[in-house]
Amino acid sequence: MTALTQNVLFLSIEDLNDWIEPLGGHPDTITPNMQRLADRAALFTAAYTPAPACSPARTAALFGKYPWETGVYGNQQRWTDHFGGRQDQSIIGRFKSAGYRTIGAGKVFHGPSHDETTTCWDEFLPLDEGPPTAVSKAIQQNKMRPKNDFGPTPENAEIFDQQATNFILNGMKTGSTGQFWALGLYRPHLPFIVPQRFFDAIPTQVANPPGLGLNNFDANNTTLWEHLPKAARKMAKAWLNTGKILQETDEYHDFIRAYLASIHYADFLLGQVLDHMDEHNLWENTHLVLWSDHGWQLGEKLMFRKFSLWERALRVPLMIAGPTITPTTIDIPVSLVDLAQRF
């Protein structure tokens, strides 16, 4: 992918776990465009994040260095803590140094003000989520912080992810060469707030997460931890309060439904990208790399979010499609750190 006759579309989706259809999914997930891409891609069924947190995962993926090499282990640390101003060492920076025009939008790097502070972009539309809302009972009752909200937004509301997608698609023109486009979709990151129609597509009564281990979620049933070592119990306990709040407000399954609706929304935007590539004949000279920085837990072992060392937080979607890629399924374990090491 080094010849300037080629383009690259680097598409990351924040907090997307393995519930998508090509990876087995949640029984109520709706990801036809993920499957559509998988049908023409190299699909990695055992891709894992180097660290279950945004900053270390994205640093590893973009720079090809493990956390123990960079010292970036948590979100309180930034890629700049190790690399300083050397953005040119990232995938994007290296493509720019090779003569590619680099255009980005959304969340690609992780850091203060996200990507607009870097110098490796020729054009960039920074992430702008706008003011917080109050949709769920948990937020309305001040039991959670506003950025953790979940639920539908009015149908005509435009979330930033749509703006970012439009920005990238406007630059992806028929006959383009020597372009590196990076689209960083924020959903399904919290807040799980997307237009009503994406909720309408999800069943009102959604199934429990695969592997929950209980017929019903019970934040007070800590017997699930009895077989766990002390460090694992401490890890899960740190995020148990989310489950207790959702149980108090009777919104546990609403929370799951909102995550599924957010995945459906991200899949819808991916569909716009795939349609655009079809319409503009970009598959002839463009490689598309789709990945997520880490997974997400929704009550398995009473754990919520990422920040754990269990499968649901570590396994991530990874697909690569393009003119030199033969559609295949690869079951060999790989790491996101391999992306920058192979580019």
Image: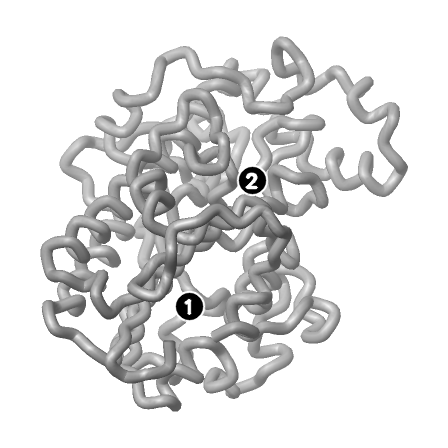
Point out which mark residue 333 bears: none
Pick the front one: 195 or 268: 268
Relative image position of residue 297 (x, y in whole percent): 59, 35
Badge number at residue 113: 1
Q: Can residue 189 be seen in this view?
A: yes
Circle 2: is it few (<14), some (14-19), or many (20+) Cα within 10 Å?
A: many
Residue beneath the point at 17% across and 49% down: 275
Drawn side of residue 88 relative to residue 326, left or right? right
On the image, which quarter does residue 36 sit in? Answer: top left
Q: In the picture shown, does residue 291 fall above or below 7?
A: above
Q: In this view, does 243 lie to the left or right of 98?
A: right
Q: Position of residue 62 (x, y in %)?
A: 51, 70
Mark 2, residue position: 296
Q: Which residue is drawn at 48% across and 83% down?
A: 87
- Name above or below for residue 223 compared with residue 164: above
**Precedes in sequence: disc 1 or disc 2:** 1
Seen at 25% across and 58% down, the residue is: 164
In this rendering, position of residue 55 left or right of residue 255: right
Hey, which quadrant is residue 165 in on the image?
bottom left
Q: Horizontal and vertical percent for residue 150? A: 41, 31
Residue at 16 percent across and 74 percent down: it is 176
Q: Quadrant of the N terminus?
A: bottom left
Residue depth check, mark 1 versus mark 2: number of the one nearer the observer:
2
Q: How many labels does the image show?
A: 2
Residue type for callout 2? Trp
Is disc 1 surrounded by few (<14), some (14 to 19) or many (20+) residues within 10 Å? few
| Secondary structure at numbered mark 1 | loop
